[in-house]
Image: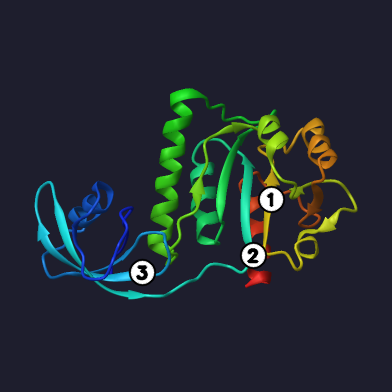
Amino acid sequence: MPRLYCAEPLASGARLALPAGAARHVQVLRLQPGTALTLFDGRGGEYEAVVTHMGRSEVRVEVGAHRAIECEPALAVHLAVGMPANERMDWLVEKATELGVASIQPLLAERSVLRLAGERAQKKQAHWQGVAIAACEQCGRNRVPLVHAVQPLQGWLAAADAGLVLSLRPGTQAIGAAAAALTQLTLLSGPEGGLAPAEEEAALARGWRAVQLGPRVLRAETAPIAALAVLTSSAS
């Protein structure tokens, strides 16, 4: 059964026109009146629904019963990441969403290959938010992680609460042990080439804790996904 995100608040018994994105999805799937859907609005749980009207510019549905289904991990992980280039950031957003990330903060770091600002950064943010929505529709999540606006790492770090920073420093604590007994945390991961020494030192000076995943050096898009897998599975 198709699962669709509806940004409009849902309620059992409501009859409504789907927002443009969800409506296009229904049209692409060539669904017909009477077809059953699952809708979620990001506010918890999901709703049964039925297509009542298929037009060229409007799709209408009737919302049915609410199902109080939740599949969020016990540990809320907010991922702050130096953006990897090209389609690797798309992949990172998709997989992080599937693994249960609570939010994603794209960062412009000293070693970032992808340099975004202004309108281009805004368009990328909207695109990545769409990637997160599509991943939720596919994987069964009912709460969509927020993808924040792109920020320079140093400026963001100055205002952020301390968390964990993925590091190549020898002897740093294993990430699973560092997160024990927490209910939420922020994880900072660098771009291609990792965080610059000055960036990591700035984080540590503000109370961040250096953690590591193991003896291998992982790619910029792989390291945060591996960390999320450890954190969300161990806390579930």
Chain-order first, disc 3 or disc 1: 3
Quarter containing the C terminus: bottom right
Whether label 3 touches label 2, CB < 8 Å = no
Whether label 2 touches label 1, CB < 8 Å = no
Q: Name the element at disc 2.
A: loop
Residue 228 can be seen in this image:
yes
User: Would residue 66 be found to the left or right of residue 235 on screen?
Assistant: left
Residue 90, horizontal then vertical, whole percent? 48, 45
Instruction: Give the labeled residue for mark 2.
Output: 75
Residue 203, horizontal then vertical, whole percent? 78, 39
Callout 3 amino acid: Glu
User: Would residue 44 be found to the left or right of residue 157 on screen?
Assistant: left
Q: Which numbered circle lies on residue 46?
A: 3
Question: Dot 2 surroundings within 10 Å: few (below 14), some, or many (20 or more)?
Answer: many
Quarter containing the N terminus: bottom left
Question: Dot 3 surroundings within 10 Å: few (below 14), some, or many (20 or more)?
Answer: many
Q: Hey, which residue is sitting farthest top in the picture?
A: 118
User: Would residue 90 be found to the left or right of residue 165 on screen?
Assistant: left
Q: Name the quadrant containing residue 150.
A: top right
User: Would residue 45 be found to the left or right of residue 74 on screen?
Assistant: left
Instruction: Give the labeled residue for mark 1.
Output: 187
Q: Between marks 2 and 1, how big is the CA–CA gap?
A: 12 Å
Give the residue displayed 10% in from the left and 60% down from the top.
53
Q: Name the quadrant containing residue 181.
A: bottom right
Callout 2 amino acid: Leu
Q: Name the element at disc 3.
A: strand
